[in-house]
Amino acid sequence: MSRYRPPTTPGSKFITPAGHARLSAELDQLWRIERPQVTQAVAEAAAQGDRSENAEYIYGKKRLREIDSRVRFLRKRLDGMTVVDRPPADPRKIFFGAWVTLEDDTGARTRHRIVGPDEFDLAPGYVSMDAPLARSLLGKRLDDEVTIRTPAGERSVLIFAIDYEAS
């Protein structure tokens, strides 16, 4: 058995304005606030002498590597992003950024927003556009019946409402 893993394809390049602002704020926080503080702490720990047994120095350097890695990722990711800040030409179809209300066979309703892969964990109800649920919904219209594959099996849902409000 080898350790080779095929390269993963990056997620979709679309993001909502709120998601872009959140990632930009995280990048700014890491680069302008957290990294200088950790750098200062590492410099102070290095000034104490023997670095091989200095835990503050070792863990500070490790944290710097983590910060630099995340900063590189965020810069690279934000450079290629497309911010979707307007509703589509046909608001009766499901596209990126849509709030979709689904009704199952029992009459229970759930509401989901289709967002980019970098922001789907922000709030309950956010679904990545790369997720099977979102892929099965994209391009569908109001009152369409959609079959969704779940770990428990296939289930059928009705598209009850579609809106593109900012909430």
Image (spheres, rainbow, N blue to C red):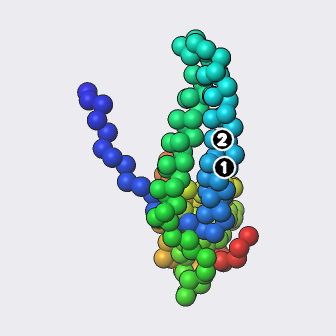
Q: Answer yes or no: is residue 148 visible.
A: no
Q: How far apart, in angstroms, are the residues tagged by discs 1 and 2?
A: 7 Å
Q: Position of residue 126 (x, y in %)?
A: 63, 59
Q: Label 2 near label 1: C-beta < 8 Å?
A: yes
Q: Residue at x 49, y 49 (%)?
A: 72
49 above or below 127? above
Q: Position of residue 50 (x, y in %)?
A: 58, 12
Q: Position of residue 46 (x, y in %)?
A: 61, 22
Q: Residue at x 53, y 42 (%)?
A: 68
Q: Answer yes or no: is residue 93 visible.
A: yes
Q: Is 128 on the left or on the right of 48, as rendered?
A: left
Please give the label number shown on residue 36. Answer: 2
The disc labelled 2 sits on which kind of residue?
Pro
Q: Secondary structure at mark 1?
A: helix
Res. 115 image quadrant: bottom right
Q: Residue at x 56, y 29 (%)?
A: 61
Q: Secondary structure at mark 2?
A: helix
The disc labelled 1 sits on which kind of residue?
Arg
Res. 49 image quadrant: top right
Depth check, front residue: 26 or 89: 26
Q: Which residue is mark 1?
A: 32
